[in-house]
Image (cartoon, rainbow, N blue to C red):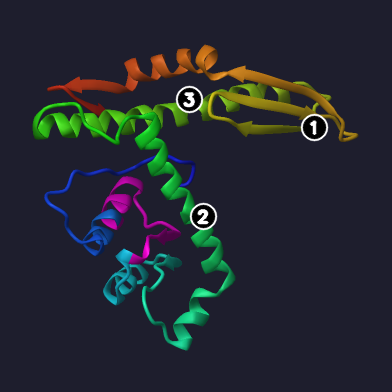
Amino acid sequence: VEGGIVTRWDVLDGNPSDKLQWVPSLDAHQQLFGKPPTQASADRGVFSADNETEAKSRGIKRVVLPKPGKKSEKRRQHEKQPWFRRARKWHAGVEGRISVLKRCYHLDRCLNQGQDGFHRWVGWGVIAHNLKKIGTAVAALIFTENLLAEAHYQRVYITERETCIWIGSFNSAGSLAIYHRIKMREFITRIVVRFIFRYIHVRNGIGCLHHQ
């Protein structure tokens, strides 16, 4: 979802068609958030007329399923619309997220034994990824609030990097007043550890994430 949080993962039996994963994904999103997403997108392998119709019937405003193969002129014009192209560019980030999960959270190869071990390996990898995203957002929010507490700071500039957060504050004249580098390893650890012990419970070796 927006913000880089992985909200659903599953270990599938065999190698089922991608088209069959569209409706379960929509169901999981609606169950988690209580409403359908504003935008839903997927790769060409997920496209089907039934999947597109199902998403629209749920009230999803922007359904982005590019059609593979030969397209009619009407379909080409549909996919050339500005909102469709913007959504395709946004969807490209999904592939990057998968790459990060494989490279940084070791989901490229499972070293656990058995089906339960496979589930644990994937689940903890996703949880670790989400905790870092949450910790980054919380840290940025804390420092932003501290900067905004100073009356002479008008705007705050924040960017997220892989290993640190860069925060810059600009005065009313547009000049850079502060440019601060926060090392993730030194600062985020405290937040993430607290989050783990408050919200993560281990049950039969499988982590369960709870909201309070």
Residue that label 2 marks:
90
Q: Is any atom of residue 211 visible in this view? A: no
Residue that label 1 marks:
154
| Quarter of the image where the C terminus is located | top left
Mark in front: 2 vs 3: 2
Q: In the rendered structure, does residue 162 fall within the stretch colored magenta? A: no
Q: Residue furthest left?
A: 114
Instruction: Look at label 2 and name its amino acid.
Output: Trp
Residue that label 3 marks:
135
The answer to whether the residue labelled 2 contacts the one labelled 3, judged by CB atoms less than 8 Å apart, is no
Nearer the N terminus, badge 2 or badge 1?
2
Question: Where is 32 relative to 51, above or below?
Answer: above
Instruction: Look at label 1 and name its amino acid.
Output: Gln
Q: Which residues are magenta?
A: 26-44
Residue for point 53% across, 12% down:
186
Task: Give the Cα distance between marks 2 and 3.
Answer: 23 Å
Q: Quadrant of residue 43?
A: bottom left
Neighbourhood count class around disc 1 (C-alpha, 10 Å): few under 14, some 14–19, many 20 upward:
some
